[in-house]
Amino acid sequence: MSFQQLEQQGTQHKAIKILKHALQSGRISHAYLFSGPTGTGRMAVANAFAKALFCMDEGWDACGVCRECRKFEHGNQTDLIAISPDGQSIKIDQIRELQKSLSYRSTQTGRLVYIIDHVETMTIQAANSLLKFLEEPQSPIVAILITDNGQAVLPTIRSRAQWIPFLPMSPEQMLMKLTEEGASPLLARSAVQISSGLSGAREILQQNEFAEIRSLVIQLGKESLTRFTAAMITAQQQVFKTELSKQINMLLSLLSLWFKDFTQVLAGRRDKLVFIDQLDWISSHAYNRSFAGWVACMEHILEAGKRMRANVPPQLAFEQLLVNLQEG
Ligand SMILES: [Zn+2]
């Protein structure tokens, strides 16, 4: 994708503005630190920037038609190197390997670009090794370092890189944008609440099962409050015997939003409901429990998620959750 396409999607105006300015003025830094939550389009912007750097056209954006742009689009841009963690961290061997390939590579485009994802996972040795060639004065090399948390990156690296902020959009802004793009307003309303950014929400909306999971959450949410046995059967038959069992985390996140909606009614914020199509049902049941009672339901859900991550069989943890939800 080009910057122009990203801008049309409403992706990260501020980040794109800084990079555009660098391209226009020809003052390209040795290193850029892309800092912001997952799902905010960091990799898409990194690729657009790299593509523009390689582009043979004069303008600030990739032209999309020159030889280098075509190579990039086909994944054949040999002057681009991408690195991501090997297991839990980025290891010194990976950085040595990078250093080697950068020094032996004869560039086709007059530039070499490398992208390191999850740069905060670099071991100290890897970071020190990277430092040695991060700022070689005459080099045509540009580093794009991507992280969830720029503050977690070693200060010595941080200070050598230009900081590019990736800001999460508010759920309301994301909802507006996604609806403009043609997403179902009801589905988008849920998706923006469980993703940390616009591209994350888009990915969720592209999953075929998302609508199904949302309907199932409504069913389970109602049954868990009024028909315990039915809720157990629904969980067994429609979640754990199907492919949806793989989406249990998403299901839990949505279920938590379901209970949050009851607190919104009690707080007089009906317009904030996520499951706005269930306004009547939620309103008529909201006063069955106290505010604290609904918050307790959300805590039970968090607890169930924790137990699943601690390797309790998901079905067992979920059935325990249904018991807890019924009891309040
Ligand atoms: Zn081009």
Image: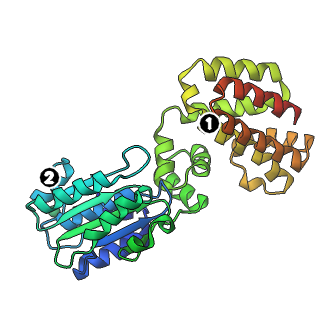
Task: Provide residue 94's location: percent of width, then percent of height.
Answer: 29, 52
Residue 62 visible (yes or no): no
The residue indicated by pointer 2 is 71
Q: Amino acid at mark 1?
A: Arg
In front here: 257 or 30?
A: 30
Q: Which residue is label 1 attached to?
A: 309
Q: Quadrant of the N terminus?
A: bottom left
* Mark 1: few/some/many CA within 10 Å (<14, 14-19, 20+): few
Percent x, y of residue 198: 49, 55
Please, which residue is most extreme toward the front here? 125
Label 1: state its secondary structure: helix
C-alpha distance separating marks 2 and 1: 42 Å
Residue nearest the viewer, comparing 60 with 46: 46
**Image location of residue 318, percent across then percent down:** 71, 28
Q: Position of residue 53 (x, y in %)?
A: 21, 67
- Label pair 2/1, CB-CB below 8 angstroms: no
Q: Is residue 122 above or below residue 252?
A: below
Specify few, some or many for label 2: CA neighbours under 10 Å numbering under 14, 14-19, or 20 or more. Answer: some
Up-down relation of residue 301 to residue 6 (above or below) = above
Residue at 62% x, 36% y: name it.
309
- Is 178 left, or right, of 135 in this rendering? right
* Front: mark 2 or 1: 1
Seen in the image, is 314 located left or right of residue 169? right
Q: Please give left or right for residue 130 compared with residue 209 in the image.
A: left
- Give the residue drawn at x 91%, y 42%: 289
Which image quarter has ligand 1? bottom left
Left or right of residue 78, residue 195 in this image? right
